[in-house]
Amino acid sequence: MSQPVLEVKQLRKSYGSEVVLEDISFSVPVHTATVFIGSSGSGKSTLLRCINLLDQIDDGSIVLDGEDITAVDADVDKVRRKLGIVFQSFNLFPHMKVIDNITLAPMKVQGISKEIARENAYKLLDRFGLHDKAENYPDRLSGGQQQRVAIIRSIAVAPRLLLLDEITSALDPVLVNEVLSTVRDLKIEGMTMVLATHEMGFAKQVADEVCFLHHGKILEWGTPAQILEAPQQPETKEFLKRVHEAGRL
Amino acid sequence: MSNEIGRPSESDSGAAPYNFGGVWVPSELEIARRAARRTRNTRNSIIAIFSSIVVIGGLALIAVTSPGWKSLSDTFFAWAYGVEVLPKIILGFGTNVTLTLIASTCVAILGLSIALIRTSRSPALAPFRILATLYVDIFRGIPMLLVILLVGFGIPALRIQGLTNNVLVLGTIAVIITYTAYVAEVIRSGILTIHPSQRAAARSLGLSHFQSLRYVVLPQAFRRVTPPLLNDLVALIKDTGLVSILGVTDAVRAAQIASSRSFNYTPYVMAAIIFLLVTIPLTRFTDRTLRRSIERQNATGVA
């Protein structure tokens, strides 16, 4: 097996005196998806923000493609070019058309010409059935369409690793499916991913590994079948029971 | 594919078919409602017209029949004299326009720079941040007339070689100093209203701090502050009249000269009218821009 795309070692993160993440270690092999589950406030989003260097970590290290991106001399902008992140709240740029949202980073960060960037963007839009939305502004799109555009925007720079932070939490049930099927397509094409989600059914489908995060610690990890169907820890059982009651499984 | 919106066509509706294509005839009730609405509207218009005539006409009548009306109109509304001095006032107004154009350009550039310095986090810029804050605090809190006097009379008093004594230049500088402080604050507030998640999204795509500002934050910030900036432009146009205190022959000064020669105040009224001819359309334009920007913001749905 070749070296993992991402390796997180003994990561620790706190806000003031409140410890949010403690002793987090895991690795993500290429073409696999690691899914983090856990109740709100368990530290899922913080973990993804730390990996993307949007939040500073307090200890430990994060290794991307064999390179320690938390090293003293790491080039933050260069690291972020290898990572894509999709947020819960889409965060599209409202003053730009869909096509310009997608081509901004390829043009300005990677220095690709406008023609080629647009051509690539249209290919992606075609593939995800959003071709006719290219010239629209984000506020003319439904929530599901906006989130799909956000996904396309983050994969347009061909990242090594895609981080998905509860990307369906702001959507109504009907729109959730179109977004999840987009992610499923990416998985099939071999995108390496780290996800935080509340959609257990979806986790079961795309995850190669599921980690249960509880009060900032990875309490239990394993294959989707192990964690979601035969959890060992009482906290995991309790969490899954509550999710089940909420009708999300 | 059907192009119709909303209505189900007869074929795919399980309910008894309803002929939407036929000619719609309003019901008795609707006709009665419309008639009642029409009557009410007519009555409202009549009341509005009548009360306007009574109030405004009454005020005008009181003014015109008052004992002082004759001397008032002779002093302020001597139109023949007003037209006579009009060319000089218009010539002076050219100075106001030039001053506005130069000042607004400089203010835009300097105001943006100061707003950027104040919102930056770079440690190297720390001293500039302190200076910029101090500058804004001071010049936003001093009456502009004082700044004009200080710059216009103070700088020539230094007698430093190479510094200009031209009152027009000094007056323009004073206006720029004051308005830069206002505009910098407007732009800064605009930058601060852009949600941090926008910057996070830009940075996560690999854009540098400067690129995020240039392509993501500033374009949105400017859209939000366009109405208040236009407001400041209207204020700037009329405040250029204040440099007349230094002896600059602008519209105000030209009117002052004309009026002191004849002890008639019509030139002032003429100058006021000229200012209004520019500021009122600009104010209307500002209102429209503001309305549009509110509509645009309301149209923006979730997140």
Image (tube, grey):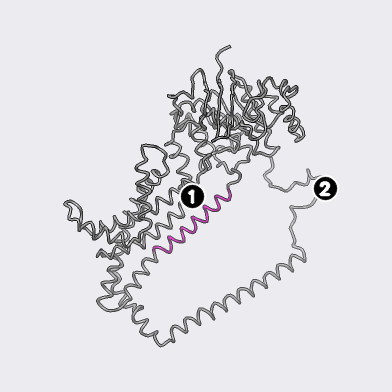
Residue B224 has which mark?
1
Expressed as whole percent of the image width and height from the top left, the position of residue A78 reads 45, 26
Quarter of the image that includes the C terminus of chain B:
top right
Q: Over which residues does the magenta segment extend? A: B278-299
What residue is at 79 percent from the left and 45 percent from the top? Answer: B13
| Residue B127, position as x, y percentages in the image | 34, 42
* Residue with the mark numbered 2: B15
Is B82 situated left or right of B9 in this image?
left
- Which image quarter is the N terminus of chain B in? top right
Chain containing mark 2:
B
Q: Are marks 2 and 1 in contact (CB under 8 Å)?
A: no
Q: Which mark is residue A188?
A: none
Q: Nearer the viewer, residue B25 or A80?
A: A80
Residue at x 63% of width, y 73% of height: B44
Q: Nearer the viewer, residue A13 or A136?
A: A13
Instruction: Pick whichever of labels 2 and 1 is earlier in the sequence.
Output: 2
Kind of residue sitting beneath label 2: Ala
